[in-house]
Image (cartoon, grey):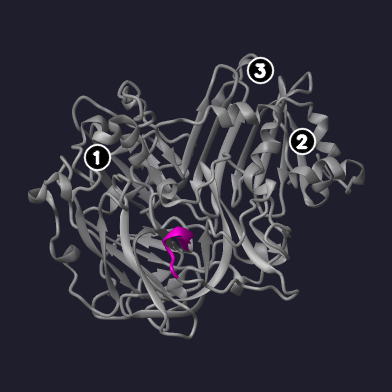
């Protein structure tokens, strides 16, 4: 999911930092090449790399707009600044941005379903609710959606707090977005395991009161769902199309999120490179001769995260940039994607994170160290200048069966 | 050697405070893993490697946790790979507060996190349904053992 470089910038520049790219000018560098070259259609929604919600300052974070409706009604709310994340599954919305009250999923015994979503740097607690989800012309009915920071369930269980870094990510500021739409290559955020076993640390809770919650199993259909799979059509995956971005970066970048693969004239597979994703959720990258079998391609990560001894002397020094690379000159590198047969080379560049223009929300050369030795995380910079398709497990396209990522 | 641990109800009350998984605890004696009731559904494989021993715990979720213990029986490292990270308060034990206090102030990131102090290193990464990580005590590594050995 996400890397919050924005916080680093905020920590560095404080209030002097422009809060939005628009207010800082830079219009000449705004990239909007026809939404990544995709024409408007009922299965296409605009996406953009911007500074994010007011009060946040993101770098390389992709946002879109989602409409949520009370189930079976025309009572709806449209929410912008929803982060597009191919590294997670399901729609999650921060409660403070909602004006509607969505019904909480109830389990067989009448208790309410509430979720602890753990990230490596914190947790998000809140009920699983039902909403009709509309994105572009696509609609999914009665989708289990997590509402984070919902005042109906104010007490976070100790097991949730203790499961990871004890930081609550339950505000727009701490989350960096009004919500998150997880459209990665699996249909649910847990799957069969949570249907048969109470996960440890606990993911799903049954709450009989606002604070009396115990771990529970959850039928797969009640788990938070990748909304794409619940669309009536165009439900086997999605494609993110973004224009290329100059090395210096750009104030904003506009592109398209296309639903379905090989279901419409605008989402046909061609001669793209298909990278298989294992049941574990990982793909394999070969970098510097090392086979990294815990790698992934993730629009929700804001940089290339990898370890490289050639950059060991290029660590950023300024406070707030810890863990990012700051080479004196932009450095060209390449890695290999392991395919079903053979490999495919991916060239990329790493620039100086401390020299990103304060008015830019997009920087294609952002790189950082990866604390896990067997992993290469191809974050949003990988998506610039590409059409990246994510096919979901259990679905097929003309070039293979999901889960896969193709570009 | 592979064996199954039966549930041990005696420690259930303490363990329930953390709602534990089958897991190892940094800095404690390796024997502590045998006292954890949640191991009921986990399998353990033990491997002796000269200066240290590795207990490999396969959790029902599919997450593999490896506990590295010196010949004195003290756990100096824990690693994990799988769909879910273990409960970190339990895994880090008495080091959890130090870990929480040492969170990097600059780079906050939902996918990668590293805490590095003179006596504690925690490195976690991954994304939803796919995580890996390791925690170790650099001052307690047996002679000749490096972080690269902690897989």
**Residue B151 can be seen, yes or no:** no
Q: Nearest the camera: A377 or A204?
A: A204
Q: Secondary structure at mark 2?
A: strand
Residue located beneath label 1 in the image: A365
Q: Are marks 3 and 2 in contact (CB under 8 Å)?
A: no
Tell me the number on the disc at residue A303.
none
Residue for point 18% across, 42% down: A359
Considering the image in quadrants, where does the C terminus of chain A appear?
bottom left
Residue A399 shown left or right of residue A209 in the figure: left
Marks 1 and 3 share the same chain? no
Mark 1 vs mark 3, CA separation in Å: 38 Å
Marks 2 and 1 share the same chain? no
Q: Quadrant of residue A303?
A: top left
Q: Chain of mark 3?
A: B
Residue B14 pos. (x, y %): 83, 40
Magenta range is A92-99
- As for residue A392 lying within the magenta part, the answer is no
Residue located beneath label 3 in the image: B140
Q: Is residue A270 above or below residue A342?
A: below
Residue located beneath label 2 in the image: B46
Mark 3 vs mark 2, CA separation in Å: 20 Å
Q: Nearer the viewer, mark 3 or mark 2?
A: 3
Q: Nearest the camera: B83 or A120?
A: A120
Q: Nearer the viewer, mark 2 or mark 1?
A: 1
Q: Quadrant of residue A270?
A: bottom left
Q: Secondary structure at mark 1?
A: loop
């Amino acid at each position: 999911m996400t890397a919050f470089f924005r916080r680093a910038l905020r920590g560095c520049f404080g209030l002097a930092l422009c809060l939005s790219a628009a207010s800082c000018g830079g219009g000449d560098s705004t990239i909007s090449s026809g939404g990544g070259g995709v024409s408007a259609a009922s299965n296409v929604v605009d996406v953009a790399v911007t500074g994010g919600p007011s009060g946040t300052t993101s770098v390389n974070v992709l946002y879109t707009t989602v409409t949520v409706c009370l189930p079976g009604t025309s009572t709806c709310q449209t929410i912008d600044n929803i982060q597009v994340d191919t590294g997670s599954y399901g729609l999650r919305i921060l409660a403070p941005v909602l004006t509607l009250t969505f019904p909480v999923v109830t389990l067989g015994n009448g208790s309410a379903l509430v979720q602890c979503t753990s990230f490596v740097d914190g947790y998000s607690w809140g009920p699983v609710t039902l909403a009709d989800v509309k994105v572009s012309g696509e609609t999914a009915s009665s989708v289990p959606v997590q509402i984070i920071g919902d005042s109906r369930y104010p007490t976070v269980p100790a097991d949730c707090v203790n499961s990871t870094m004890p930081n609550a990510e339950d505000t727009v500021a701490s989350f960096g977005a009004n919500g998150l739409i997880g459209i990665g290559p699996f249909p649910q955020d847990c799957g069969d395991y949570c249907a048969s076993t109470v996960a440890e640390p606990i993911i799903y809770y049954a709450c009989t009161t606002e604070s009396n919650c115990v771990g529970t199993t959850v039928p797969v259909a009640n788990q938070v769902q990748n909304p794409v799979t619940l669309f009536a059509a165009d439900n086997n995956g999605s494609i993110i199309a973004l224009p290329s971005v100059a090395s210096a970066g750009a104030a904003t970048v506009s592109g398209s999120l296309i639903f379905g693969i090989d279901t419409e004239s605008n989402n046909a597979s061609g001669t793209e490179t298909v990278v298989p994703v294992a049941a574990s959720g990982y793909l394999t990258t070969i970098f510097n001769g090392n086979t990294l079998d815990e790698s992934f391609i993730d629009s929700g990560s804001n940089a290339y995260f990898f370890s490289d001894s050639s950059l060991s002397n290029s660590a950023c020094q300024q406070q707030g940039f810890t863990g990012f690379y700051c080479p004196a000159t932009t450095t060209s590198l390449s890695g290999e994607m392991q395919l079903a047969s053979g490999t495919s080379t991916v060239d990329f560049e790493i620039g100086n994170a401390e020299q990103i223009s304060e008015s830019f929300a997009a920087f294609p050369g952002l790189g950082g160290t990866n604390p896990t030795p067997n992993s290469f995380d191809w974050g949003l910079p990988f998506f610039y200048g590409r059409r990246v398709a994510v096919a979901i497990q259990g679905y097929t396209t003309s070039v293979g069966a999901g889960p896969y990522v193709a570009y | 050697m592979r064996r199954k641990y039966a549930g041990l109800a005696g420690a259930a009350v303490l363990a329930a405070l953390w709602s534990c998984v089958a897991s190892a605890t940094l800095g404690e004696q390796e024997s502590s893993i045998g006292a954890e009731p949640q191991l009921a559904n986990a399998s353990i494989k033990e491997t002796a490697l000269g200066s240290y021993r590795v207990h490999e715990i396969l959790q029902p979720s599919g997450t593999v946790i490896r506990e590295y213990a010196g010949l004195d029986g003290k756990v100096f490292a824990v690693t994990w790979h799988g769909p879910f990270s273990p409960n970190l308060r339990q895994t880090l034990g008495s080091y959890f507060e130090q870990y929480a206090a040492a969170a990097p102030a600059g780079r906050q990131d939902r996918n990668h996190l590293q805490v590095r102090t003179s006596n504690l290193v925690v490195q976690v990464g991954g994304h939803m349904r796919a995580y890996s990580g390791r925690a170790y005590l650099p001052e307690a590594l047996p002679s000749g053992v490096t972080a690269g050995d902690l897989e």
